[in-house]
Amino acid sequence: MNNEPFEPRIVAFFCNWCTYTAADLAGVSRLKYAPNTRVIRVMCSGRIDPQFILTALAKGADGVLIGGCHPNDCHYAEGNYKMLRRFQLLKRLLQDFGVEESRVRLEWISAAEGDKVKSVINEMTEQLRALGPLGMPAKFAAWDQEVEELQHQVDEASETEAAHA
Amino acid sequence: MPDKPKVGFYWCASCGGCEEAIVDLAEDILGVLDAVDIVFWPCAMDFKKSDVVALPDGSIAATFLNGAIRSSEQEEMARLIRRKSRRLFAFGSCAHLGGIPSLANLFSREQLLRYIYEDAPTLVNERKNRPQLEYEDEGHTLSLPELRHVVRSLDQVVAVDYYLPGCPPTPKLAKAALTALLEGQLPPPGAVLAPDVALCNECPRKETKPTTLAFTEFVRPQQKLLDPKLCFLAQGLVCFGPATRSGCEAVCPQGGMPCSGCFGPTSRVKDQGAKMLSSLCSNISSKEVSEINRALAGIPDSVGTLYRYGLAKCLLRRKVNLPGTGKD
């Protein structure tokens, strides 16, 4: 283990019309915020399949941030409501999986709210820094150790068998 | 007698229903017995592990293995059978996706053993005895397999060539797979041997499925008098048709029960539960959080509903904060 402080990795799915534009605004306004997010632009928060969120977590993200247009402001009229509805059951599902609630967050951020991008990312980074890593890839490897150990035994046994033959 | 192709059947963590599905081939099984040599089928005939060990590697044309993998013995048998078989078929939901046994992935091994041997209300075990891995008696050492921390699908332990989905696979699919095997008509390895479209496609209630769904509530079959012809989704039931592979000919919907997803996802979907969650929730009619949650209260058990047959193959595989090694 190294002694570097833990830096969370956050995957952010931002909608093209509001939150991504807000992140652009934060950039051109030279607002400084935590560098822990990797932003993925999607056309609409309604496009964010729950599979994307689970995949991000399974592949090593410590948290997932979803940004969409405010209610009644969706470029496609209702996409953000679809995300809002999925998010309600997804929250419960993740809780049943033992994933802490603060790891997945939904925020409505309009194109004018560059400062909100900054404050949400800073706050989430701080929360996850305190919470520690989710570390699914390491967990998968640890879980599969029990299978690999037997593989070793079987390999050794068949080698001895071959040596005796 | 000319050499007939050798075929094996084996079971791991399963209920026996998949073995039943083979027997359900009924008189067709006689044709199968004419065409193949069964070299291993401990459920139905007298075979021992040593019979398989004695076979040369790769000498079995195909083995159909059902059940999830959750003990060291099942792992060892899966490995042995893999080595001896040219083709390995994951037969049924448990071998394919982890099945119902993989719902145990919501609990630690210690929680499971404590409940089964200490806390279950139907239990009499005053000394709280638990099975030991080794036991000495009169100079002999007896051993038991170890229960694993994690329940796995077959392909999470060994390479699998073909999957027969279903809880259990229908006799029709089993027969088609056997026929394809004997005639050399199998698709490229890795295939799931069922049509790659959603179940709704072959559901007799398909015509009544509304173009736009608008859920105001979710109910379970026992809570409502159901219309026997109308699409379950239109009646507010969680029916897995849209997120499940077809091939069963909609046996459950035809019997008055909504699909619960045993055939697993189509090839375009990675995580069946997440996809079903997406479909169900998107179609809730309300835009208010409180009303959305009131509707969702009709799905009290999220994991058990969304991953009933496939928790082992969920992208997260298991409750994330459980120990995976050590005593617990």
Image: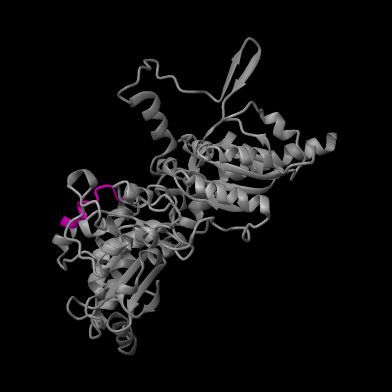
Q: Is residue A155 visible?
A: yes
| Along the line of sight, the residue nearer the viewer: B195 or B316 | B195
Q: Position of residue B238 (x, y in %)?
A: 28, 54
**In the image, is residue B210 above or below residue A24?**
above
Can you tell which quarter of the image residue A155 is in? top right
Q: Residue furthest bottom?
A: A28
B195 to the left or right of A17: right
> Magenta span has B190?
no
Report whether residue A133 is seen: no
Hey, which quadrant is residue B200 in on the image? bottom left
Nearer to the camera, A102 or B150: B150
- In the image, is residue B296 part of the stretch drawn in magenta? yes
Q: Residue at x 14, y 61 (%)?
A: B291
Relative height, residue B46 to residue B299 (above, below): above
Q: Quadrant of the N terminus of chain B?
A: top right
User: Residue A36: percent from the left, percent from the top?
Assistant: 40, 71
Looking at the image, how many numbered discs can be counted on the residues? 0
Quadrant of the rendering where the C terminus of chain B is positioned: top left
Whole-percent x and y of residue B30? 61, 37
Q: Which residues are magenta?
A: B294-302
Residue B34 in the image: above or below residue A94? above
Above or below, B282 against B24 in this view is: below
Name the side, left or right, on which B133 lies relative to A34: right
Between B93 and B36, which is closer to the camera in this rendering?
A: B36
The structure's colour scheme is one colour
